[in-house]
């Protein structure tokens, strides 16, 4: 029993939370990588319409959010070093865009899953071909999961920013 007592210490719980945060971060990074590849592949077609430009803006914001969230975690949590105010501001601005994206994704996918029969009927009327139920579910469920993971990560990152606000500096000091 005494061998397991170290599992109840605050340091161990903190390490478990950091591990969970890193796991969620790896999912966010994988999604950002997929967005980056998609952005590069469809670079010229994105700027041909307003919806394409909005998609590019949201993709770039998500990629930048993942980048700055990783920098924040490594510099502040792991290395216990300072983080510049400019990078904190960029992280927060991109976090707002990603939070809006996650809210929209969760609401849209959730409503479509709740009223799945109605959505399928509407799509059957509009489409020339019948869309298989499995294909529709394979679109809606990952959208819901990605939205939830992004939302959880944004909330957790903002809480970490507030908890470590003492390590936010006006300018980055040069390493000596």
Image: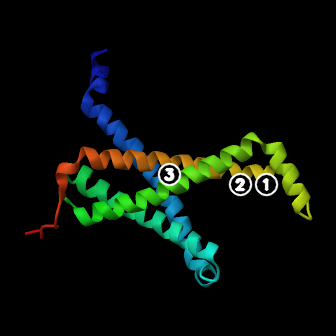
Q: Eyeballing the image, is 176 above or below 8? A: below
Picture residue at 43% right of the left edge, 52% below the top: 25
> Residue at point 45% right, 54% down?
26
Camera-nearest label, 1 or 3 = 3
Q: Please tell me whether mark 1 sits on a helix, a strand or a loop.
A: helix
Dot 1: within a 10 Å radius of its alpha carbon, few (fewer than 14), some, or many (20 or more) residues?
A: few
* Residue 72 percent location from the top left of the image: 30, 57
Residue picked out by circle 1: 135
Query: Percent position (x, y) of residue 17?
Result: 36, 38
Element type where label 3 sits in the image: helix
Report the label total: 3
Tell me, yes or no, whether the two marked residues, 1 and 3, touch with CB atoms within 8 Å: no
Quarter holding the N terminus? top left
Residue topped by disc 3: 150
Identify the residue at horizontal 12%, vertical 67% (top origin): 173
**Spatial distance from mark 1 to mark 2, Cα to Cα?**
6 Å
In the image: residue 64, left or right of residue 142: left
Q: Gap between marks 1 and 3, in whole Å?
A: 23 Å
């Amino acid at each position: 029993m005494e061998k397991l007592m170290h599992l109840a210490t605050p340091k161990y719980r903190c390490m478990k939370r950091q591990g969970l945060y890193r796991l969620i971060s790896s999912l966010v990074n994988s999604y950002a990588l997929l967005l980056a590849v998609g952005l590069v592949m469809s670079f010229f077609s994105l700027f041909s319409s307003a919806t394409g430009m909005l998609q590019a803006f949201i993709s770039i914001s998500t990629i930048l959010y993942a980048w700055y969230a990783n920098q924040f975690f490594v510099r502040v949590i792991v290395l216990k070093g300072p983080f510049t105010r400019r990078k904190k501001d960029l992280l927060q601005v991109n976090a707002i865009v990603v939070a809006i994206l996650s809210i929209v994704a969760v609401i849209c996918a959730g409503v479509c899953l709740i009223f799945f029969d109605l959505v399928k009927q509407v799509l059957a009327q509009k489409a020339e071909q019948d869309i298989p139920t499995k294909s529709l579910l394979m679109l809606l469920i990952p959208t819901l999961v990605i939205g939830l993971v992004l939302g959880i990560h944004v909330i957790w990152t903002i809480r970490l920013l507030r908890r470590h606000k003492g390590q936010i500096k006006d300018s980055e000091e040069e390493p000596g």
